[in-house]
Image (cartoon, helix red, strand yellow):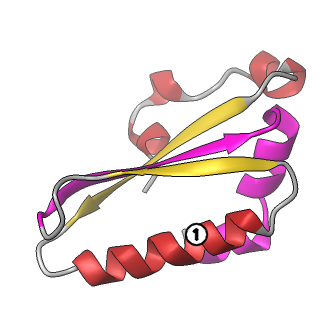
Amino acid sequence: MSLRDNHPEMRPTEEAKTTTTEPVTVLEGRVLQPGHESDYQDWVHRTIAASERFPSNQGMTVLSLEAGQAGERYLVLNFANEATKRVWQQSEEWTRLR
């Protein structure tokens, strides 16, 4: 689940979607339930591998609590611009990962 799904104020406006040519950062959050740490780590590794094959990906940062703790986790995805971010978010790879 994306944090943007729960927070409409975090969704970009249509104008931003069509005019941004600057680098774009996306914050993707997950709530990790106890006992699912390895599932999450597997998902992160698959997401990183997919993003590395994706054109205009400018890297990803994983933000998490101490290993083994349940709670919120975040991926920070960086793209060259709004258009490349949108292509990633509409890609088959990202659809499978979500």
Say which quarter of the image contains residue 90.
bottom right
The residue at the point 31 percent across, 53 percent down is 73
For residue 13, which quarter of the picture?
A: top right
Q: What element carries label 1?
A: helix
**Kind of residue at disc 1:** Thr
Q: Is residue 97 left or right of residue 82?
A: left
Where in the figure is residue 82, as x and y percent of width and height?
Answer: 80, 33
In the depicted structure, whether residue 93 falls above or below residue 28: below
Percent from the top left, x then y, of residue 51? 70, 63
In magenta, the rendered stretch is: 69-97
Q: Does the magenta stretch include residue 84?
A: yes
Q: Residue 64 vs residue 14: left or right?
A: left
On screen, residue 66 above or below 23:
below
Residue 94 in percent (x, y) is at: 67, 67
Screen quadrant of the N terminus: bottom left
Relative to 7, say whether 79 is above or below. below
Q: Quick one: quadrant of the C terminus? A: bottom right
Pointer 1: residues within 10 angstroms few (<14), some, or many (20+)?
A: some
Q: Is residue 95 visible?
A: no
User: How many numbered callouts?
Assistant: 1
Answer with left or right where residue 74 lies relative to residue 34. Answer: right
Whether residue 68 appears in magenta in the rendering, the answer is no
Residue highlighted by disc 1: 47
Residue appearing at x 26%, y 58% in the figure? 31
Position in image of residue 41 (x %, y %): 37, 75
Q: Is 9 drawn above or below residue 88 in the view shown? A: above
- Residue drawn at point x = 77 percent, y = 73 percent: 92
Task: Report the front residue among 1 and 67.
Answer: 67
Would residue 85 be visible to someone looking at this image? yes
